[in-house]
Image (spheres, rainbow, N blue to C red):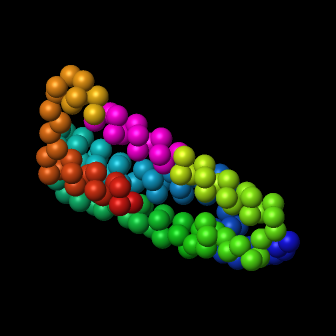
C-alpha cells in the first residue's frame, strides 16, 4: 500500500479544494470567455484600447491555469501499476472507464447536434473561419 506523505509536494496541494476548483473553472472558462468578450466588445462602445489587454488577460488565465494544473496532475492520471494495491488499481481502472464513457457521450451529443438539423431538416451548417478557429482553440485547450 502506498504511503501518503504528511507534507504536500507542491504549492497547489496546500490549497483548499475550493481554491483548486476555482483554478480549474478559471482555466476551462478563460478561452471561451475571451471569445465571448470579443463578440460583446464589437457591439459596444468600449474603446479599442481595452480589447487587447482584456483578451490577453483571459488567454493568460487559461495558459497559467493549464500550466499549474499540469504540474499538479502530471503523473496522477497514469498512476503506475506496480506501486498500487488491488483496490487502488480497481479505482484507477474505473476512473479511466468513466472518463471515456463521459467523453463518448459528449462526442455523440455533438455529432447528433450537427446531424439532426442537416439530415432531418435539410438545413446547411456553415462553418466560417472564426467559428473554425474558435472550435480548434477550444478543442486544443
Magenta segment's dominant SS is: helix
State left or right for residue 40 relative to residue 112: left
Image coordinates for residue 85, horizontal then vertical, percent: 82, 68
Res 6 visible = no
What residue sits 35% from the left and 55% below the top? 139
What residue sits 21% from the left and 51% below the top? 132
Quadrant location of the N terminus? bottom right
Observer-nearest residue: 82 or 62?
82
Observer-nearest residue: 65 or 70?
70
Looking at the rendering, the stretch of residues picked out in magenta corresponds to: 102-114
Quadrant location of the C terminus? bottom left
What residue sits 74% from the left and 58% below the top? 90
What residue sits 44% from the left and 42% below the top? 106
State left or right for residue 65 relative to residue 31: right
Observer-nearest residue: 58 or 110?
110
Image coordinates for residue 23, horizontal then vertical, percent: 54, 57
Q: Quadrant for residue 50, please give it.
A: bottom left
Observer-nearest residue: 55 or 112?
112
Amino acid at each position: 500500500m502506498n504511503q501518503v506523505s504528511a507534507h504536500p509536494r507542491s504549492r497547489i496541494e496546500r490549497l483548499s479544494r475550493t481554491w483548486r476548483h476555482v483554478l480549474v473553472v478559471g482555466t476551462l472558462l478563460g478561452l471561451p470567455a475571451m471569445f465571448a468578450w470579443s463578440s460583446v466588445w464589437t457591439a459596444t462602445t468600449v474603446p479599442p484600447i481595452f480589447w487587447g489587454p482584456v483578451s490577453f488577460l483571459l488567454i493568460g488565465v487559461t495558459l497559467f491555469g493549464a500550466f499549474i494544473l499540469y504540474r499538479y496532475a502530471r503523473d496522477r492520471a497514469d498512476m503506475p501499476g506496480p506501486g498500487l494495491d488491488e483496490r487502488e488499481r480497481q479505482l484507477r481502472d474505473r476512473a479511466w472507464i468513466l472518463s471515456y464513457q463521459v467523453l463518448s457521450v459528449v462526442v455523440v451529443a455533438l455529432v447528433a447536434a450537427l446531424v439532426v438539423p442537416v439530415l432531418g431538416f435539410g438545413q446547411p451548417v456553415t462553418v466560417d473561419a472564426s467559428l473554425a478557429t474558435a472550435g480548434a482553440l477550444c478543442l486544443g485547450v
